[in-house]
Structure formats: structure tokens, C-alpha cells
Amino acid sequence: MSNSMEFSFCKLEIFIPETHLSPLQRALQAVDAGHIGQYDCCMSYHPVTGCWRPLEGASPYLGTAGEISREPEVKVEVTCRVERLEETVEAVKAVHPYEEPVINVIPLIQVGI
């Protein structure tokens, strides 16, 4: 067996204010993220508390430079095909209000077992 493994799918973890969830869902649907077998628009989300401190020169959506912010957010999890990853990340950034959105990309060995 080869040491390198090819991944067809990845999972995105996106942290975003709940107020922007609907635009995010539409953006993900437009690039076919969350398409698993005979289902599309598949994603999950749950509430989290985000913490950050804007540094000098930042233009935060929420918070003040030099002060730690704690705000409610939702963590969205969605799958996408690796060949559409760049397009999907750009779609997320287009609707995300943060200057530096947190978008984690995790390779998946298998989807929809």
C-alpha cells in the first residue's frame, strides 16, 4: 500500500455568526457542498462561543483592537469534493462577515458509510 492516500472529499468547519447562517447555506448549495449520494444541502451546525483579540490595524466585524472578545457563533460542518475546495472556500468567504474567517479543512477517508 502506498504511503500517500488520495482523498475525494473533505469536511469544512466554518465558524460564523448565526445571523449569517442562511446566506452561508445558499452559498454552499450554489457550489454543491454538502452533496452526499442522493441528498444535497447536507450540513450540521451547533452553537459555540468564539474568542479572539483583534490586534492593532485589524478591522473586526465584532470587538475592539486589543480587547478579548467572546461572542456566540455557530460551527457549521459540511462536506465538499476536493476538486471543488477552492471554489467552496471562496463562496464561504464571499458571505462571511469576518475579516479573517476560520475555515478548517479536514480530509475525509470515506463519506456516507
Image (tube, rainbow, N blue to C red):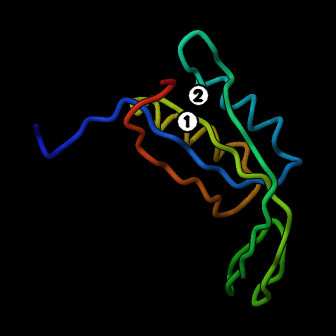
**In the rendered image of this protein, does residue 16 appear above or below residue 35?**
below
Outermost residue toward the bottom in this view: 66
Instruction: Assign a secondary structure to mark 2.
Output: loop
Dividing the picture into quadrants, the one containing residue 42 is: top right
**In the rendered image of this protein, does residue 58 appear above or below residue 16?**
below
Task: Residue at 70%, 55% (x, y): give it.
Answer: 15
Specify the quadrant that holds the N terminus: top left
- Amino acid at circle 2: Ala
Outermost residue toward the right in this view: 19
Labelled disc at residue 33: 2
- Labels 1 and 2 touching (C-beta < 8 A): yes
Residue 103 in percent (x, y) is at: 58, 53
- Which of these two is toward me, 12 or 99? 12
Q: Residues within 10 Å of mark 1 (few under 14, many from 20)?
A: many
Task: Residue at 18%, 44% (x, y): give it.
Answer: 4
Residue 17 placement, left or right of 29:
right
- Amino acid at circle 1: Thr
Task: Residue at 74%, 74% (x, y): give it.
Answer: 51
Labelled disc at residue 88: 1
Label 1 or label 2, whichever comes before in sequence order: 2
